[in-house]
Structures are given as C-alpha cells and as structure tokens.
Amino acid sequence: MIASNPAATAPLPRERSTNRQEAAAARALRITATSWFVVVALGQLVFATYIGGFYGRVTAAGTPERWNEVMPHGYVAGDFFFNLVLGLHLAFAFVITIGGLLQLIPAIRRTRPALHRWTGRAYLVASAILAGGGLAMVWIRGGAAGDLSQQIAITVNALIILVCSAIAWRQARARRFDRHRVWALRLFVAVSGVWFFRVGLMAWIAVNRGPAGFDPKTFSGPFLTALACVVYIAPVGVLELYLRAQRSRGNGAKAAMASVLAALTLVIAVGVAAATAFMWLPHL
C-alpha cells in the first residue's frame, strides 16, 4: 500500500488566499445585511410606537381632527367613509410594521411556527388592505400630499405590494417555503416604502440642514420625485441584487453588495435619528 502524500492534496497558497477572500466577502455581506435589518427594525419599532402613541391616542380620545397636526388633509369633517378608511389604514400600518419584523426573525419561525403562520396571515391580509386603502386615498379621495409623480410612484408601490402578497400566500399554501420566504422578503421591502420615504426625507433634510430640491409648501420638486421612485420602487431591485450576491460563488458581487448595504445602513441610521428627533418623539 502506497501512503498518500498530504502535501499533494493541500490547497495551494493562491487557493488558500482565494478561499480567505471569499470567506471574508461572505462574512462582510452577512454582517452588513444584519446591521441593515437591526437599524431598520429599531427605526420601525419607533415608528410603530409613534403610530400607536399619537394616532391611536388622539383617536381614542375622540379627537381624530388632530391627525391634521402631522398629516395635511388627513381628517375631513363630515367625510365619514374616508375618515374610516384612513383610520383603518393607520391601524393596519401599525399591524404590518410589527408583524413584518416578527416574520423576519428566524428564531420565531423555528421555535414558534404557529405564531409565524398566524402573524404571516395577518401580515399578508393587512398589506393588501393597506395597499388598497392607499390607492383609494390617492385616486378617489384626492388631496394627498405631493404631485402626480409621487402619486404614480405610490401606485406602483401598491401594485407591487398586492402582487407580492398574493404570490407569497400562494407559495405558502403550496408549501414551497423557500420561494415563500423570498416573496415575503420582497413584500417586506415594498411595504416599507412609506417608512423609507420618511426616513430618506429626514436624512436629506438633516444633511442639507433644511429643505433642498423641493418646495415644502407644495411638497413637490425634483428631489421628492427622485426619492419617491427610489423608496417605493427600487428596494425590490436592491433586494434582488442582494439575493443574487448571496448565491454568487465569486467574492466581487458579495463585496460590492456589502458596500451598498453599508452605505444604505448609514443613510437609514441618519434618517431614523432625524425622524425620531423631529417627527416622531415630539408627538408622543
């Protein structure tokens, strides 16, 4: 019997270097993705607290007209139907903000499958109702803030939400759970569009030390048009790039995506801090 030579099967120095680079790129992608989710989760929890603490409080007190303190044309005296639609819209926004975060925590999926299923059902239904209510408020009620470009972006976002929620539901029913998780992720980033808009706007204002590139009175301008397209439509595309980078065998795509996520996390962190300080906390 001829003894094997361990040196003959050992990786070459170049192979070891390549393996280390690939491992480092994969680790960077994992760390930046986790950091992104943590920042988003904390920011959305503050936002949910604001929804419940302000809108819930003034509504329970019987003074829904105070919605207009932070939402122009929100409450309209005598318009019972659309005031109800807006109230339900806000309630479902609270539900999906909390429910979406619960859906994305692996430990809950693994140890509390029943909770995951029921919160998932509630999340899908609430997302569809939220999208439908948003479309009604933009195109039927009128008076929504922003110009036509922003309303079109919101409409596209609502359609993305409806498609993603329907497909995520079908994939779960068919027990194709890998596909279901991908569509649930797409749904999460699409539903977060309204939150991304607020955070992106506040990050921009904080960096520029005031409004820039738009008219705060009419709430229109080139920056808001660009922001609406970026936050309502682009996140699904960014998610696709992330999923492709995860599956990529090379380290270039992973490293590039990690850099993109790091930059996005920084922008979101600035926006969350500004929105918390100037939009949300003052009304709690």
Image (cartoon, rainbow, N blue to C red):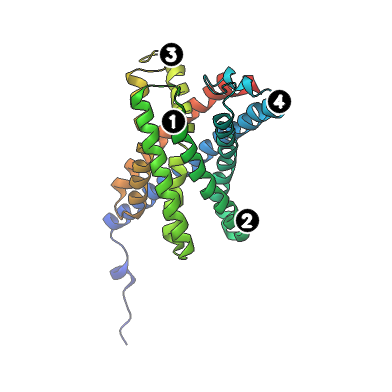
Name the kind of residue labelled 1 in the image. Answer: Ile
User: Nearer the N terminus, badge 3 or badge 4?
Assistant: 4
**Label of residue 246 in the image:** none
Name the kind of residue labelled 3 in the image. Answer: Pro
In x, y percent, where is residue 172?
48, 60
- Note whether 110 is above or below 240 in the view shown: below
Marks 4 and 1 sit apart, C-alpha to C-alpha, by 26 Å
Marks 4 and 2 sit apart, C-alpha to C-alpha, by 33 Å
- Few, some or many C-alpha atoms within 10 Å of disc 2 (few <14, some 14-19, many ≥20)? some
SS for dot 3: loop
The residue labelled by disc 1 is 140
Labels 2 & 3 near each other (Cβ < 8 A): no
**Residue located farthest toward the bottom when viewing the structure as drawn:** 1
The residue labelled by disc 4 is 62
User: Nearer the N terminus, badge 4 or badge 1?
Assistant: 4
Mark nearest the camera among 4 and 2 is 4
Marks 1 and 2 sit apart, C-alpha to C-alpha, by 36 Å
In x, y percent, where is residue 108?
60, 54
Q: State whether residue 41 appears in this view.
A: yes
In x, y percent, where is residue 226?
33, 26
At x 59%, y 33%, the residue is: 84
Marks 3 and 4 sit apart, C-alpha to C-alpha, by 30 Å
Quadrant of the image containing the N terminus: bottom left
User: Nearer the N terminus, badge 2 or badge 3?
Assistant: 2
